Image: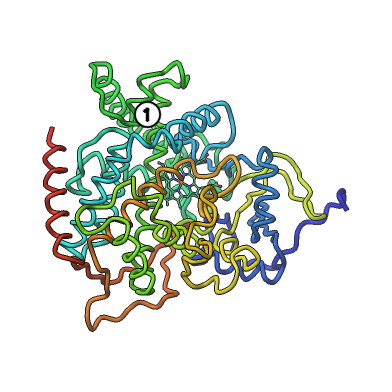
């Protein structure tokens, strides 16, 4: 069957037109999941001429995106993004020399081993986060975002602790993130549906002038931020950061200052919402499944005791807590459709043609619920599925879910993401009981807000109370010291 040109099956009539991320369908992963049940593991859609392949099983996603990774390592073309970033944002860029260099560099800077340098920062920031949640529980969502932004800005630029999300450098970075999101958002730019418009001269195409201008403005700001760290490094500053490491060995990474500056920003954009969303789902899970919370706290009490905060030296023994994080990421992937890959050449799979240039979507939502991989009750949060009968993690090396994507495009930040989640979760659970306020309605367990490709819980109320007397004393003392040490 290898050479017949049958396209994979799919729904005959689409209820909408336009490019995938221009669908008006809310949380499209659920609809794709249904189509997977109806049409099989690979589903074909045609969005106004653009072939789209949905991969709904682990086997299909790994066979293609992993085993044939070279053919699926591109990203969809986005004309506005090209003007806005000139290919310098490697998370959205197609394969090429620059992507390869930036990818290799970030793999090295964010490897399991390199990220040991940042563990003390992760530990400190987790304590501040736990304290913020206890002090002002109604604003938990804001605390998570600030924690996430502050952490990544310190790792990238050695920035001091972020006091507010309204600081100019954060506003600038977030404004840029919004422009990226807009470039991908429903019907924002006609040129994505009618690429011929790209031939219009700039004088007739305002979007082109705007994107061009934005590129110059943002590039200057990103370079300024990066160069400030580089100059501190050249003056003998020893503190660790991704920018400092890049600045220290330009010949090793073979990147210009401008390229280094953009690499760092690509990491910021990819880290911010994903980390905050995962932690929101963790809190949501804790109020939905109080027995899981208690079991995790019992393990933490046994391993850490009441006299000190959890630290990275405890992590290897915290099997259940790590299983909770794996399970939260399986159960509610922050990017339920991962990020799209695009095929380089025509390919054949299972007797079907996957045309060159197809947008290939791994439907992580479905893949993380495959009963042949995860067993029964896949819609429930059951950390035990990641543990052996004697309570050890099943496999230390595998994630236990597919929420970091596949192949050469797999999330490059997964080590630092996992480390920040484990220490934040352990610290929050050590210090606080997490409960819905009395007389408040617990959200339905299936409630889920879709923001384009991101999934997060709808706002809900949540209370934090100190679990024991020592917790308050130990935490306050730690936070005072951390804030003091941060003053520069
Ligand atoms: C829990 C948090 C996170 C989740 C769930 C997550 C998930 C993902 C997913 C699904 C992808 C797309 C993979 C694919 O295309 O197959 C991705 C890509 C990426 N992630 Fe993450 N991510 C997280 C945190 C981070 C952090 C903290 C960083 C940086 C420090 C980061 C940096 C990146 C980059 C740069 C890419 C693009 C890679 C490329 O295109 O080559 N991520 N992430």
Q: Position of residue 344 (x, y in %)?
A: 68, 39
Tell me if 247 is positioned left or right of 17 in this view: left
Identify which residue is drawn at 70% across, 71% down.
38
Q: Position of residue 400 (x, y in %)?
A: 53, 56
Q: State the quadrant of the C terminus.
A: top left
Query: Which residue is situated farthest in the bottom direction here?
Result: 439
Image height of 68 relative to 389, above or below: above
Tell me if 399 is positioned left or right of 144 in this view: right
Q: Residues within 10 Å of mark 1 (few under 14, many from 20)?
A: many
Q: Nearer the viewer, residue 214 or 464?
A: 464
Image height of 111 relative to 229, above or below: below
Identify which residue is drawn at 64% across, 66% down.
14
Q: Confirm whether residue 439 shows in the render.
A: yes
Q: Where is residue 195, by image quadrant?
A: top right
Q: Nearer the viewer, residue 396 or 141?
A: 396
Badge 1 marks a residue whose secondary structure is helix
Tell me if 180 is positioned left or right of 40 in this view: left
Identify which residue is drawn at 15% across, 49% down.
479
Q: Where is residue 319, by image quadrant?
A: bottom left
Q: Position of residue 7 (x, y in %)?
A: 77, 56
Q: Where is residue 133, by image quadrant?
A: bottom left
Tell me if 95 is positioned left or right of 227 in this view: right
Q: Nearer the viewer, residue 84 or 382?
A: 382
Q: Position of residue 321 (x, y in %)?
A: 39, 59
Q: Nearer the viewer, residue 73 or 377?
A: 377
Image height of 205 relative to 63, above or below: above
Colouring convention used in this rendered image of the protein: rainbow
Residue tagged 1:
261
């Amino acid at each position: 069957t290898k050479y017949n040109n049958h396209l994979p099956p799919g729904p005959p009539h689409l209820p909408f037109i336009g490019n995938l991320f221009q669908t008006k369908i809310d949380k499209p992963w659920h609809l794709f999941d249904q189509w997977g049940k109806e049409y099989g593991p690979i589903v074909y859609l045609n969005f106004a001429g653009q072939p789209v392949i949905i991969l709904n099983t682990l086997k299909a996603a790994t066979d293609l995106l992993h085993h044939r990774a070279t053919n699926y390592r591109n990203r969809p073309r986005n004309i506005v993004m090209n003007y806005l970033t000139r290919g310098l944002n490697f998370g959205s860029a197609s394969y090429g020399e620059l992507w390869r260099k930036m990818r290799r560099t970030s793999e090295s800077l964010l490897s399991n081993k390199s990220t040991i340098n940042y563990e003390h920062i992760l530990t400190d920031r987790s304590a501040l986060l736990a304290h913020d949640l206890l002090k002002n529980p109604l604003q938990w969502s804001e605390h998570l975002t600030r924690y996430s932004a502050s952490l990544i800005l310190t790792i990238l630029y050695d920035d001091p602790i972020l006091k507010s999300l309204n600081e100019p450098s954060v506003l600038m970075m977030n404004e840029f993130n919004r422009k990226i999101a807009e470039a991908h958002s429903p019907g924002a730019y006609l040129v994505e549906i009618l690429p011929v418009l790209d031939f219009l001269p700039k004088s007739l195409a305002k979007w082109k002038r705007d994107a061009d201008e934005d590129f110059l403005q943002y590039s200057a700001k990103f370079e300024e931020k990066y160069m400030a760290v580089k100059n501190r490094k050249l003056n003998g500053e020893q503190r660790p950061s991704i920018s400092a490491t890049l600045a220290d060995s330009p010949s090793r990474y073979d990147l210009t200052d401008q390229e280094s500056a953009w690499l760092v920003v690509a990491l910021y954009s990819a880290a911010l919402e994903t980390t905050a969303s995962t932690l929101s789902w963790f809190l949501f899970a804790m109020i939905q499944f109080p027995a899981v919370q208690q079991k995790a706290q019992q393990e933490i009490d046994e391993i850490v005791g009441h006299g000190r905060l959890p630290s990275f030296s405890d992590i290897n023994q915290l099997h259940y807590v790590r299983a909770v994080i794996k399970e939260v990421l399986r159960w509610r992937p922050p990017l339920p459709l991962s990020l799209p890959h695009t095929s380089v050449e025509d390919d054949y799979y299972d007797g079907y043609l996957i045309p060159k240039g197809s947008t290939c979507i791994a439907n992580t939502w479905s893949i993380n619920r495959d009963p042949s991989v995860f067993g029964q009750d896949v819609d429930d949060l059951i950390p035990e599925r990641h543990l052996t009968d004697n309570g050890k993690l099943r496999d230390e090396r595998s994630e236990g879910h597919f929420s970091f994507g596949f192949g050469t495009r797999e999330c490059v930040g997964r080590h630092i993401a996992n480390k920040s989640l484990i220490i934040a979760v352990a610290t929050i659970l050590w210090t606080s009981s997490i409960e819905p306020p009395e007389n408040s309605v617990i959200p339905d367990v299936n409630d889920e807000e879709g923001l384009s490709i991101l999934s997060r819980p709808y706002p809900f109320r949540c209370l934090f109370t100190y679990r024991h007397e020592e917790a308050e004393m130990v935490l306050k003392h730690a936070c005072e010291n951390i804030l003091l040490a941060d003053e520069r």
